[in-house]
Amino acid sequence: MMMALSGAPSACSALSWSPIRIRPVASKSSTVSLSSPLHHPRVLSPFVPEVKEAVASLHSEFRDVDNLVAYNTSRVLKAFQNARVGSHFFAGCTGYGHDEAGGREGLDQAFAEIFGAESAIVRSQFFSGTHAITCALFAMLRPGDELLAVAGAPYDTLEEVIGKRDCDGLGSLQDFGVNYQELPLAEDGGLDWDGLATAVRPQTRCALIQRSCGYSWRRSLSVHEIGRAIKMIKLQNPNCLVVVDNCYGEFVDTIEPPMVGSDLIAGSLIKNPGGTIAPCGGYVAGRAKLVKAAAARLSAPGLGIDCGSTPGDVMRAFFQGLFLAPQMVGEAIKAVQLGSRERLIGFCEAVQRSSPVSSFTKPVAGATPGYASEV
């Protein structure tokens, strides 16, 4: 398991400031103490020497991350402006949501532009990335179709959705007659390009690509690699739809999977695109017809995307989180491989002790719905 370690300088660090110099006037009462912070703006580093050395050695990498943050923030800002986001969008709505003031449509429009998609549905009713991906898969697949996982075993919580792990007949894809095939990764942890060249069959209706490494130690896939895989898939079967599990992948690059040909992407707002502010929610984005089909799985056929209530405080958090997401992702993509269960637990305990909320509690690994391992 990889834990994000936020040890990078903020994107605001470029906004350096200079000490204010005060010239004493001819008055005995106007003297300024030489120990004043105005004369000594430098702050002693709170880090031990080893940490300071590590940060210094990674200066060029952190600078690249800051440039990425600035670029993606400009994309988000432009999308907000094009969607004409105004304060009235934050009002929210109740009930069926038919009297919504424009925030729902504006958020969908901005999200679609940011991710290079025809359409998007961003809703609080998606309660996890797994939920959003499930809606996307069930929207596409029918009995007799085949689902091909291109990047090895999928994320733990999708195993029961697919039927790879027993879900007690609760309605997995395999329960509905969808066949499942899996293409293992290559020895180097990347995609098996030779295997992918012949893996897609006429009955393969959907190919699933997991962008993030999840809980494995393989490297995450770049968008350019995803684009190459999509071309290979479409060459074998032009009718095969490609869904990208985009969880943990948003804003870690300058482009997103729809920009290189994916039919749908899906993910969670309580991860990257929520900017650590969104309290719930998920999204599906891509081709307009397929987004509508996924929306019908979230709600019901015929209801479309023009319904569903969202409280005002949540709608405001969605917009605010999305705007801040590039910065928050930039802080989170510096990571450390701890190497053992004991070190991981010790790290989690240290983070909790240093937290502003519930610092007096101790995190304990335990069983979590959807996961085969302790979390």
Image: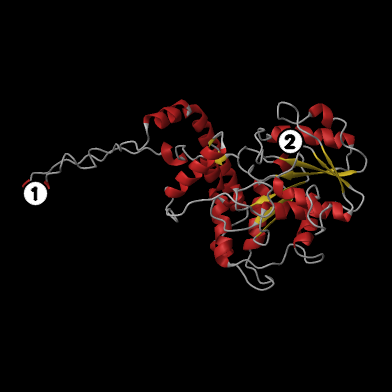
Neighbours of disc 1 within 10 Å: few (<14), some (14-19), many (20+): few
Count of numbered tags: 2
Q: Is residue 358 left or right of residue 67?
A: left
Quarter location, residue 335: top right
Indicate the position of residue 221 as horizontal and vertical percent values: 69, 35
Residue 71 seen anywhere in this rendered image of the structure: no
User: How is this picture coloured?
Assistant: secondary structure
Residue 236 seen anywhere in this rendered image of the structure: yes
Q: Nearer the viewer, residue 278 or 93?
A: 278
Indicate the position of residue 250 as horizontal and vertical percent values: 63, 44
Q: Amino acid at mark 2?
A: Ile
List the residue tagged with mark 1: 29
Q: CA distance from mark 2 to mark 1?
A: 69 Å
- Tell me: residue 125, above or below residue 209: below
Q: Amino acid at mark 1?
A: Ser
Q: Is residue 24 left or right of residue 190?
A: left
**Element at badge 2?**
helix
Q: Residue furthest bottom?
A: 95
Q: Is residue 237 left or right of residue 163?
A: right
Indicate the position of residue 72 as horizontal and vertical percent values: 58, 41
Indicate the position of residue 46 as horizontal and vertical percent values: 35, 38
- Name the mark nearer the viewer: 2 or 1: 2
Looking at the rendered image, the quarter that the N terminus falls into is top right
Q: Contact (CB < 8 A) between labels 2 and 1?
A: no
List the residue tagged with mark 2: 226
